[in-house]
Image (cartoon, coloured by chain):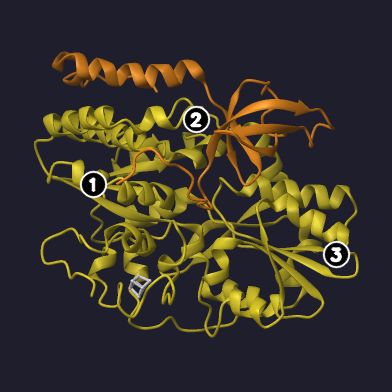
Chain colours: A yellow, B orange
Amino acid sequence: MKHIDEYRGREQARTLAAAIARHVTRPWTIMEVCGGQTHAIVRFGIDSMLPPAITLLHGPGCPVCVTSLDLIDKAIAIASRADVIFCSFGDMLRVPGSCQDLLSVKAAGGDVRILYSPMDALQVARDNPHKQVVMFAVGFETTAPATAMAIHQARTQGLTNFYVLVAHVLVPPAIATILGAPGNRVQAFLAAGHVCAVMGYSEYEPLARQFKVPIVVTGFEPVDILQGILRCVIQLEAGRAVVENAYARAVRRDGNTGAQTLMRDVFHVVPRQWRGVGSIASSGLGLTPAYARMDAERHFGLSAISAAEPSACISGLILQGQKKPHECPAFGKACTPEHPWGATMVSAEGACAAYYRYRRTEPVGAGAEGPA
Amino acid sequence: MDWTVGGDGVMCLAVPGRIESIREGGLLDRVGRVSFGGSIRDVNLAFVPEACVGHYVIVHVGFALSVVDEDEARRTLEDIRLIESGPAQTDDTRPRPL
Ligand code: SF4
């Protein structure tokens, strides 16, 4: 397919990997923020093409994985109501809450529907005027414009039975948290190309300056990812730390200004709890007062539900790049995609699920514990 | 390891497709029929008012987020060919424009 296959050429990938090897003189640790990139790296074995001096760490960029237990439990509480149709992306259905998941609500007769686009939820609301239709709005800046459009259209069309459980998260505050953490090992970042397609990349420039890390806007195909890594390595070796765009075919410096305008109308920035990471200031989106009527948390009057994660699950450390999935004793044994303990084993973008799917028989790393 | 088959249905991933036709509506519901390697889906084009038939757009959860810049796409692939054709290019550590 055009604009996909050209970036999956083995020869180009080898050329880039060889160029990376020629440039490297010291060990470097680079983090890819986005779960989509983690998936591609593991699927295409990109890390195994790199010289041993390069370590790739997987970041917290899986919105399914970082949605807080509190919000999952609220979603389950809302979806269990007989007067509600609950609309969600399919990835969220298997994410474990404290006691159950959305799939078990559906199996018990709850009306839980899978969305392809947030706009589908509007149609459900129009078709079911006597039900309360609730959309679970999960995702990074990539997904937020679509949610914003659905919310804006709901108001324009005068829909009174449409509500949104907002779980949107923002990438730059998470990068700042990782870089500012004591013991941070990350020396350069691959920024998520599609987040930048929406937001542009000027907001990464202060981060690159403050923390002296190269940040390279990177696409999702193997050749794109290798090119992002090469640009990081060239900067690291030269002692430079600036923002570069290695995904110029899809990303402009200012991003998509139309999408940003609508997002600013519908959302404002709020603190957000990240599952496995903790609370991060200014890292989430909430509804502005003009749209607060559609806020499902407010409408259903749900107070915070506090619950504990299964203690053996180390997904928090995995999301912060401190551990890799095969270092978890439960990986592939007690915890599998069929019986996930943590959200990182559920989503296709979760590091545990990616390793399970592509790496079960060949765990990488010295002393790594292989699955049974 | 399969380097050619695409389509994982990953929630956060956006994929490029070609606009085959456009149904003009209001400003906020301009919809295109977009081909992803032959399979056709309706895609909301409200965020890419500049998009025309024949353009490739990056699509995520039913919305086009950006129009693929064909010149930049060619340039990226050309950069790799330059690396292949000689080490001179790969040793170039001069800052390059964003
Ligand atoms: S393998 Fe399972 S238990 Fe271990 S960190 Fe991943 S999700 Fe948690």
Is residue A326 toward the left or the right of residue B23 in the image? left
Vertical order, A267 against A77 (above or below): above
The residue sitting at 33% across, 80% down in the picture is A334
The residue carrying mark 2 is: A251
Is residue A283 toward the left or the right of residue A314 in the image? right
The image quadrant in which ligand 1 is located: bottom left
Which quarter of the rendered picture does the C terminus of chain A lie within? bottom left
Q: Residue furthest front?
A: B38
Residue A47 has which mark?
1
Residue A298, given in percent of the width and then of the height, sits at 74, 71
Q: Chain of mark 2?
A: A
First in sequence: mark 2 or mark 1? 1
**Closer to the eye: label 1 or 3:** 1
Instruction: Compute the Cα span from label 2 to label 1.
Output: 25 Å
Residue A161 has which mark?
3
- Looking at the rendered structure, the secondary structure element under dot 2 is loop
Residue A187 has which mark?
none
Disc 1 with disc 3 on a shared chain:
yes
Residue A9, given in percent of the width and then of the height, sits at 32, 30
- Looking at the rendered structure, the secondary structure element under dot 3 is loop
Residue type (three-letter) at the residue carrying disc 3: Asn
Disc 3 with disc 2 on a shared chain:
yes
